[in-house]
Amino acid sequence: MVQAINALARQSEPPESSKLGGTDLRRLRVDAYRVTYEIDGARVAIKVLMVGRTLV
């Protein structure tokens, strides 16, 4: 999972991620986990807001 989060630094909107509703947040599923993150375009910084297990 750490590798997937680190990869966001190179590609902040990978094809397997999606927008979260009408917000600026994005979500990325990594195995049984979901990472919710926000992209700060001004500095190209990624803020990981939450990592949690999903019911799969």
Image (cartoon, rainbow, N blue to C red):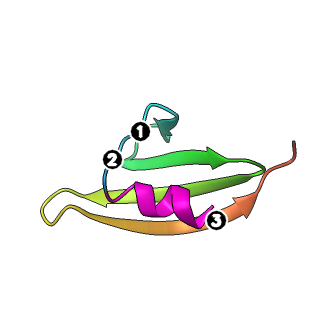
Residue 49: x and y, percent?
50, 68
In magenta, the rendered stretch is 1-9
Q: Badge 1, how many Cα within 10 Å: few under 14, some, many 20+? A: few
- Residue at x-position 53% and y-position 47%: 27
User: How many angstroms separate mark 1 from mark 2 (CA)?
Assistant: 6 Å
Q: What amino acid type should be assigned to the residue bearing mark 2?
A: Gln
Can you tell which quarter of the image residue 43 is in?
bottom left
Q: Local crowd at mark 2 within 10 Å, few (<14), some, or many (≥20)? A: few
**Residue 23 image offset from top left, x and y in percent:** 40, 45
Residue type, label 1: Pro
Quarter holding the N terminus is bottom right
Q: CA distance from mark 3 to mark 1?
A: 17 Å
Name the amino acid, label 3.
Answer: Val
Which of the two labelled residues, at mark 3 and mark 2, occupies the earlier sequence position?
2
> Residue at label 2?
11
Q: Is residue 4 rendered magenta in the image? A: yes
- Please check the rendered image and state whether residue 27 is part of the magenta-colored stretch, yes or no: no
Residue 54: where, in percent of width, then height? 79, 51
User: Which residue in the rendered view is the most extreme toward the left?
Assistant: 42
Query: Is residue 54 toward the left or the right of residue 36 in the image?
Result: right
Q: Residue at x 71, y 62 (%)?
A: 52
Q: Residue furthest right?
A: 56
Badge 3 is on which residue? 51
